């Protein structure tokens, strides 16, 4: 059985002040990204739960995140009606996609040249799926085409 072949131990990760909403490992499995209602996505070392850094810039609950295949960029979706693109290593905010309703789900396409973002129904708006082109140059500000 699984419990006989794997020595599992809980890791306590202290850092969020509000409930967690989403967790995501990088492809290598050595980093864990967490989203929470406290507005601050966080990255942790997966093996020991040590906090590596935070991504500051959202003004609402962060519902979700995804990583580029090379783990250089992070995209987050928030109740503050935005999705943000981040530099994973530095924590710098690279771009903000603004919407008229909360961003509920985000995902990079294979190749990392596209991202899909869903928005919630809000006021008179229906939910929507937004496909955005992502620049390969992190210093290029034209992420929308």
Image: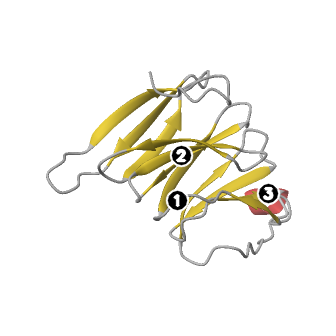
Q: Residue at x 76, y 60 (%)?
A: 53
Residue identified by numbered label 2: 84
Q: Say whether marks 1 and 2 touch (CB < 8 Å).
A: yes
**102 in relation to 106, above or below:** below
Marks 3 and 2, how far apart in space?
Answer: 23 Å
Residue 102 as seen in the image, left or right of residue 26: left
Q: Which mark is residue 67?
A: none
Q: Secondary structure at mark 3?
A: loop
Q: Quadrant of the N terminus?
A: bottom right
The tag earlier along the polypeptide, 1 or 2, is 1
Q: Residue at x 73, y 37 (%)?
A: 71
The tag earlier along the polypeptide, 3 or 2, is 3
Residue identified by numbered label 3: 46
Q: Is residue 1 visible?
A: no
Q: Nearer the viewer, residue 60 or 43?
A: 60
The percent coordinates of residue 145 (x first, y second) are 44, 21
Report crowding for label 2: few under 14, some 14 to 19, many 20 or more residues within 10 A (C-alpha): many
Residue 131 as seen in the image, left or right of residue 67: left
Q: Say whether marks 1 and 3 touch (CB < 8 Å).
A: no
Residue identified by numbered label 1: 58
């Amino acid at each position: 059985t699984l419990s006989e072949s794997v020595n599992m131990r809980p890791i306590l990760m202290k850092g969020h002040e509000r409930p967690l909403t989403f967790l995501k490992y990088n492809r290598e499995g050595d980093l864990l990204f967490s989203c929470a209602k406290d507005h601050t996505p966080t990255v942790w070392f997966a093996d020991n739960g040590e906090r590596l850094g935070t991504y500051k810039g959202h003004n609402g609950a962060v519902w979700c995140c995804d990583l580029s295949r090379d783990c250089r960029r992070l995209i987050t979706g928030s109740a503050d009606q935005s999705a943000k693109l981040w530099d994973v290593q530095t924590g710098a905010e690279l771009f903000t996609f603004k919407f008229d309703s909360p961003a509920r789900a985000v995902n990079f396409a294979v190749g990392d040249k596209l991202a899909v973002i869903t928005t919630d129904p809000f006021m008179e708006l229906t939910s929507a799926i937004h496909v955005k082109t992502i620049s390969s140059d992190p210093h290029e500000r034209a992420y929308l085409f």
